[in-house]
Amino acid sequence: MAATPTSAQPRAESAWARRLDSLNKSWYKFSRNRLSIVGLVMVAIIVALAILAPYVTPYPQHAGKYVNFKAKNLPPGSEHLLGTDVFGRDILTRVVFAFGNALLMALGVLAVSVPIGTLTGLAAGYYVGTWVETVIMRITDVFISIPPLILALCVAAVLKPTLTNSMMAVTVSWWPWYTRLTFSLASSLRNEYYVQAAELAGAGRLHILFREILPNCASSIFTKMALDVGWVILVGSALSFVGLGEQPPKPALGTMVADGISRMPDQWWIAVFPALAIMVIVLGFNLFGDGIRDMLAPEEM
Amino acid sequence: MAEALLEIRDLHVWYKVYGGMLKVLNGVNFTVGFGERVGLVGETGCGKTTTMKAVLRILPRPARIPQGEILVHGRNVLQMNSQELADLRGHGLSMIFQDPTAALNPVFTIGQQLYEVIRYSAGSPAGRIKDKRAVALHALQEARLPDAERMLASYPVQLSGGMRQRSCIAFAIATARDLLIADEPTTNLDVTIQDQVLRLIKELVTQKGTSMILITHSLGLAREVTDRVYVMYAGNMIEMAATPELFANPLHPYTQGLLASVPRLTGGGFAEGIPGRIPDYKNPPAGCRFHPRCPRAFAPCREAMPPYFASGDGHLVACYLYDNKRRRVPQNG
Amino acid sequence: MASGNSTDNQILVAEKLVKHFPINRSGIFRRKWVVVKAVDGIDFTVRQGECLGLVGESGSGKSTTAYTVVGSYPPTSGSLSFKGQNIARPAVARPLHLKKDIQIVFQDPGSSLNPRRSVGDILAMPLAVHRMVPRGQTPTKRIIELLDMVELPASYRFKYPATIGGGERQMVAIARALATGPSFIVLDEPTSALDVSVQGKIINMLLRLQREFHLTYLFITHDLSLMRNVATRIAIMYLGKIAEIAPATDFFEKPLHPYTQMLLSAIPVLSIAEEALKPKKIHSVGEIPSPVDVPPGCSFNTRCPFKTEICFREDPLMRSFGPDHLARCHNI
């Protein structure tokens, strides 16, 4: 009979204690890198601001239809911390509201592209070497070759240039990257011994795909998602910069930058602050994504 | 005491991890003389690889060395700067790793990797390396690799496991003058190839007068190839003796348990092995780290790590059972 | 072929079993296929309740044989039958009751257990697949029973493979193999990745389970000292063919084939008594040929110290040299 492990801590058996312990461990792994914590704080602030925008901004009504030409083009000062734009709207308020729009776009795009990409990648990876893989991966190749901006422009030309349509365009060019990622993971994982063990024991395809292979892909997928929020927002800003995406007067970061470009360098605040905001979001999510990657990395055996 | 080539004194190595510190090495003492072949035997997790990595200063980032010295030619390796370390590594300390496939870069040919090794071994006997190719060919031939010319142009993936390991040995030969550390060099090889590779290592080491440290978990291997053996458990060297003496007369209960666990060609079934597990390094047992699993543990074992007691000529054992000053405890005490 | 024993208790019968893997080595301008002759015509039987050991080095085909028996791939030709039923096809094509009956324990417990699933989940999988637990009920009771069979505490069902030791992981793998109540288990080097001090415990456990549940084992290893203490009969393979097959004592005391002698003389042992038992030292020379490039005649002729002229011309046939003791060599 195996002797009990020498001097090991007595392990609490309750489910709560176990979950708490695993949370503690995850936090430990996440927080090894100081920058990840910075990223976490930035993301938390961004999300909080986005949700609470109507309550924390000084001039919430400026986010809609509002004009006040008396206050137009004011530089940053005590009444308007970041200045005002051509229509006299407070830039700080509009930037914060724009956060919300940006995050919504990112959520929408990822909510659709991640499931599609993951499922197709899993199928292609498991059936690597067969016609299933060939068909899926060649279709993926076609979609990957389409640049998101051009596609969005085409969509706008055919349909109206709204936020929803832009989101659709970005989604269509986004899911193939998840397919590629999941495919490369799944195709190497399918040769692992534990997958063979499951197959030989008679497990069905669904069990193998979702209970054996997918959990081992999850960490890479979640990491990519965290990083992608920043990237989708960047692409979204590029789209709104050229006039697609959220239409005025609703605030969008790219649009604000576009408005301000012609007024550089005199009224520099109109373009610079929204651009800084884009940078902050992308940086925050990148650092956060690094932390997620560390946290989800598999344990050393 | 500049007699020894390598001397490790009271080395402690800790790793910082979730939940505390892994106190892996607990005062390691280890000596290798000139031209000696020393074996380091221990199981998974006992700290043998950590010890060697400490000597070569290639420990991973969370490692801390709170105490101890590693002296090579009398100079403390732990206090060397990177220039001095590079000199040390170039001048004749080399290592053969367990997995030759992982140790060789798959995108370069054997020849390219060998030239690199030769180039970095500053001050090698060839003086300024005018003819790298000749040195490389010579090394490959000494490693008994067939068709050395073709080997120079081959990629690792084109070679079998045995040939890859012999290539690694060729790299080591090209530079090793003082010390060769072989970390489980034949674990992944077939028995008949293992035999060939070991004979090769033995011959080369004897011919060149290089010292050798053979790290292995296989007792049979240590018995065949070494002059002196250290047995390691949970971060301590618990027994050391000349090879024939250790196998004829194992003293430490762990060594005895280990030898009893090895299946014999003469038959006789299996002993149950050694009960229990290696200790949790975050919270190691007080005193002798083996005492929770030891069938002969008694009072002093729980209090302090035993020092080395001598038993016979050059046979040291870290176990209170052999403390001549104490009252000897009866077998079932 | 089969000696005095009746054929009734033969649980697994392989005849002229062949498994070749065609590999595409085409270049841009040249079409070329090579064939890896992993298993090149072997005959063997496994009897109920025994432990047949399969020994060999790289390229011998022992692993391929094991995986063909278990159903990872179908044989290229030849027959393979289990309890009278034909199993010369991959596991996916076999009836479910046969999949229950033949199980496998892999070599490396680190990769044979899914690191993202708990021990309990891992053990629950075969139970669910084979409907061994009534719908709606959790299989906890059966999981605890299985853990108990391999002497692990019930609390281990919540642990993940990364947090338990190598020996314990292998015990979980054994419990998984036992979950479906098989009668035949293939063991692919079950202790090679483990420390010596744990090895004895695992092997003793396997032998005890064999007695308790009337199991039959096909045991693969390269460690001959281990084999000496586990197997009842041993077959040694070289480049896809069986070189010698004999009961354990005969195999070690009267090895006939030169390869057997070479292997036995090369193993490192610990005591003088064992040294005395080894055949005279035969130094191996040269590399093991690849199964892509099998030499003509006897496949061992590149390394055999006793080769004669006929060895280059003719592939020897399996001949009997005693009760249950067969070998393939011209020069015995």
Image (cartoon, helix red, strand yellow):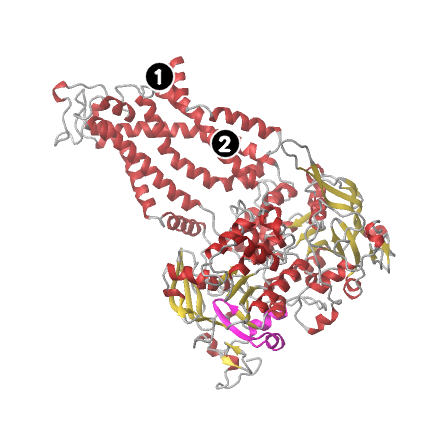
Could you say which is closer to the camera, residue B70 or residue A227?
Answer: B70
Which residue is disc 2 drawn over? A179
The residue that appears at 16% across and 32% down in the rendered structure is A81
Q: On screen, C300 above or below A209? A: below
Amino acid found under the numbered disc labelled 1: Pro
Chain at tag 2: A
How many other residues sit within 10 Å of disc 1, few (<14), some (14-19) or many (≥20)? many
The front one of A19 and C165 is C165
Q: Label 2 amino acid?
A: Thr
- Chain letter of mark 1 equals A
* A193 sits to left or right of C47: left
- Residue C224: mark in rendering: none
Q: Secondary structure at mark 1?
A: loop
- Do the residues marked 2 and 1 share a common chain? yes
Towards the viewer: B160 or A269: B160
Could you give the CA–CA distance between mark 2 and mark 1, rounded to whole angstroms?
28 Å
Q: Position of residue A116 (x, y in %)?
A: 49, 29
Residue C18, magenta (yes or no): no
> Within the image, what quadrant is residue A166 found in?
top left
- Where is residue C262 shown, x and y percent of the image? 74, 61
- Quadrant containing the C terminus of chain B is bottom right
Coordinates of residue B72 in the picture (x, y in percent): 44, 69
Q: Are marks 2 and 1 in contact (CB under 8 Å)?
A: no
Find the magenta span and give its range. B232-260
On residue A161, the disc is: 1
Say which element carries label 2: helix
